[in-house]
Image (cartoon, grey):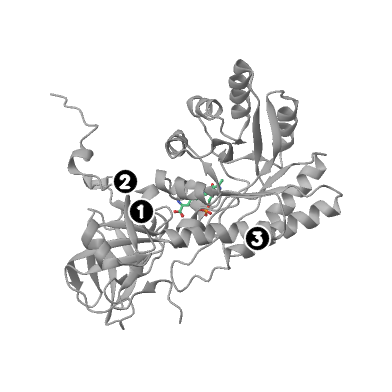
Amino acid sequence: MQTPYQTNAAGHLSIGDVDANELAQRFGTPLYAYDVGAMRQQMRDFKRVFEERHLKYAVSYASKAFATIAMYEVAAQEGMHIDVVSGGEIYTALRAKFPMADVSFNGNNKSVEELTMAIENGLGTIIVDNFYELQVLHELLAERQQTQDILLRITPGVEAHTHDYISTGQTDSKFGFDVNSGQAEAALQQALADPNLNVLGVHAHIGSQIFDVTGFQMAAAKLVDLVHEWDFEPQVINAGGGFGIRYTADDEPLPAATFVEAIIDTIAEKTAAYGMQMPAVWIEPGRSIVGPAGYSLYTIGSRKDVPGIRSYLAVDGGMGDNIRPALYQAKYEAVLAAQPDAPSDEVVRVAGKYCESGDVLVWEQALPKTKPGDVLAVLATGAYGYSMASNYNRNGRPAVVFVENGQAKVVVERETLADLVRLDRHYL
Ligand code: LLP
């Protein structure tokens, strides 16, 4: 069976052609390590689908999955667009010198400060989510006698079968303009009548970690039906992100390109049927670009055997660097860095060091016998790991290294004890 990781001549886990044990030794644990080549490959695979069909497109990396200066640099180098969702992500992109024209800005409650930051820095496309935002944007732009390209985010009423917290396209959602009540059409008319707004098209994002193309096809078809009904010919249809990845052997994702082909085909067929021009197709993948490329390296410490029930193997990180198991009951797979392919001797629960029973990294993991000091690698942690990390229990966030062609480089420093109190002020 093909493993979702690589090994070197010594049989050790290898990340970007560097031995994972060596990474742990050199940079310490816990550590986030990214295989940069794998991320580049995924970005290129997405782009190729559009290039081969000679379509106008944007593959906009949904940077909420993992937003750092280095990541934005790699995305820019690969000719990607990026999607941001906060002033913090805008600022990070600016510091990375990311071309602002290739940035889109999503979010259901963008602040006046964030919108100001966007329009003053030439951010390409604002994906407008609600009427309040239409009003604020109008005022900011009119004051400056500026125009702004926008998309309208629509709630297409498509329910993606995924964990509740991460499905955003169904009708009962805080995101986007509602279709059934006529709000979406009213928003379009208002935006079209606004001389400061240039409506490029529409946007929908139906959810995350989706394995089936049907939801994407339904949402894309719905968007085309709607714009036709509204007598509006969009230059852009943005179908969002959410393409599922492999976390464990239970996950059997389609190649990311398959989702994109399904979206493109739907839009092409529907627009042709209505006699409309084929618009540019934009997508916003996050997880599928960075998820499988990321590894979390930990050092194994204590162990607790509960006779007849289970054994807990504790590592030096946990819910502070990966909240997903605790928050979404997310499943992961882990291997020993020194012998990822070794036959297993037992099934353990991999727990963290945080003071909470739900602090689990892997619910059930088959492993060979381990000892304190061994390095454990949790696979496919590149998306929503670092980006959702916290300082819970006053633990510093791990360092992030980018590894490529046998070279490793720190792109986010490990937080020190001094960092943890940097913003604290004495009261007495
Ligand atoms: N576009 C929009 C408008 C989104 O809201 C999202 C994700 C994406 C694109 C990218 O979705 P992706 O391709 O990464 O699945 N923290 C959760 C995921 C939240 C996703 C939120 N929106 C998790 O750890 O699973």
Q: Is residue 315 visible?
A: no
Tell me the residue at 53%/49% (across/down): 61
- Mark toward the viewer: 2 or 3: 3
Q: Work out which quarter of the rendered image holds the N terminus and state it.
A: bottom left
Does residue 91 show up? yes
Residue farthest left in this picture = 428
Label 3 Cα neighbours within 10 Å, binned few <14 / some 14-19 / many ≥20: some
Label 1 vs label 3, nearer the camera: 3
| Labels 2 and 1: the sequence-earlier one | 1
Mark identifier at residue 49? 3
Residue at image position (61%, 19%) is 139
Some atom of ligand 1 lies within 8 Å of the CB belonging to the residue at label 3: no
Q: Please determine whether, in this image, residue 113 is positioned above or below residue 301.
A: above
User: For residue 390, which numbered disc appears in the image?
Assistant: 2
Question: Which residue has dot 1 on it?
Answer: 323
From this view, report whether residue 105 is shown above or below residue 293.
above
Please, is residue 119 above or below residue 263 in the view?
above
Left or right for 148, reference 288: right
Residue at (43%, 72%) from the top-left corner?
Answer: 4
